[in-house]
Amino acid sequence: MDDATQDPTRMAEVPLTGGARITIERRGHVVLIGINRPDRDNRFDPDAYYGLAKAYYDFDNDPSLRVAVVFGHGRSLSRGVDVDAFNALTSTGQHLELTDGMADPFFKSAHLSKPLVFVAHGDTWNMGHELFLTADIRVASQDVEFGQDETTHARFPGGGGTIRFPREVGWASAMRYILTGDHWGADQAERMGMVQFVESDREAAIAKGIEVAEKVAACAPLGIKTSLESAHLAIDESEAAAFAKLDEQYGALYRTDDFAEGRRAEAEGRPPVYSGR
């Protein structure tokens, strides 16, 4: 029986080439997802958008992967939308439509069941910033420049920036940048609480993102999944709904192989090796 038959959801690697809009590199239980349009400052055209949507779906449905780290090839994470490329699409009467095997990168209707770590470096503007805000853990390099300046171009943050940004940093802090179009840096982002780690440069920031991802990947996958599910339920629906499920979720984890492995590892004085079962 070949590998594809044994594990049909296994996420395939996509090496760094000129034609790959999104690159995929597997590192054990961690996968690195790279935005690869450095000649366009990693602006998203439809192909890059679809590529990221497919990468997210494949990651979430691959049982061998536990955490994803998203970053940009070249100087920037992303300057946002490639307006010319999207205009070329809409001028034909077509629209972006996700199909089976893709997950909405903005999580407008459903979240991934696994954690995303995002690394921001260089220009991280508009759609790039909105994607950054979807992350569960965020790392920035000291040279990052954030921007949510669509209002200066007769647009608005249509990828969730008007929702997530105020929720993350507070109303006035978010509106200070959304309504003026001013940009801000790593130190301001850290003070506002939207980034958890600031590193000296792009390479150090990516290394920190991988380090954090590996630490998360060493934890019990079902415990991680349940923690995300509970937190999203509290934010997206209500705290009451989240509280109502706590006992059921806790009891389910007690019956897993991983819970038993955690107890054995503690008794034997060794790190646990979790299987996700």
Image (cartoon, rainbow, N blue to C red):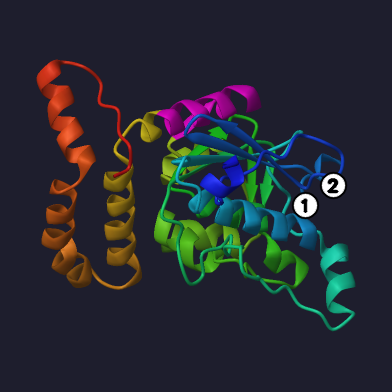
Q: Which segment did they paint magenta? A: 197-214
- The answer to the question of whether label 2 and label 1 lie on touching residues, with beta carbons closer than 8 A, is yes
Instruction: Read off the residue under disc 1.
Output: 43
Which residue appears at 29% of the width and 44% of the height? 277
Task: Tell me which amino acid carries mark 2.
Answer: Arg
Res. 45 in view = no
Residue 121 against residue 171 in the figure, above or below:
above
Task: Tell me which amino acid carries mark 1.
Answer: Arg
Q: Is residue 188 left or right of residue 221?
A: right
Q: Quadrant of residue 168?
A: bottom left
Q: Position of residue 26 (x, y in %)?
A: 59, 33
In magenta stretch: residue 102: no
Q: Position of residue 273 (x, y in %)?
A: 30, 28
Instruction: Read off the residue under disc 2.
Output: 40
Residue 37 against residue 216 in the figure, above or below:
below
For the residues marked 2 and 1, what is the alpha-carbon distance in whole angstroms? 6 Å
Q: Is residue 93 left or right of residue 271?
A: right
- Asked whether 8 or 52 is in front, the reply is 8
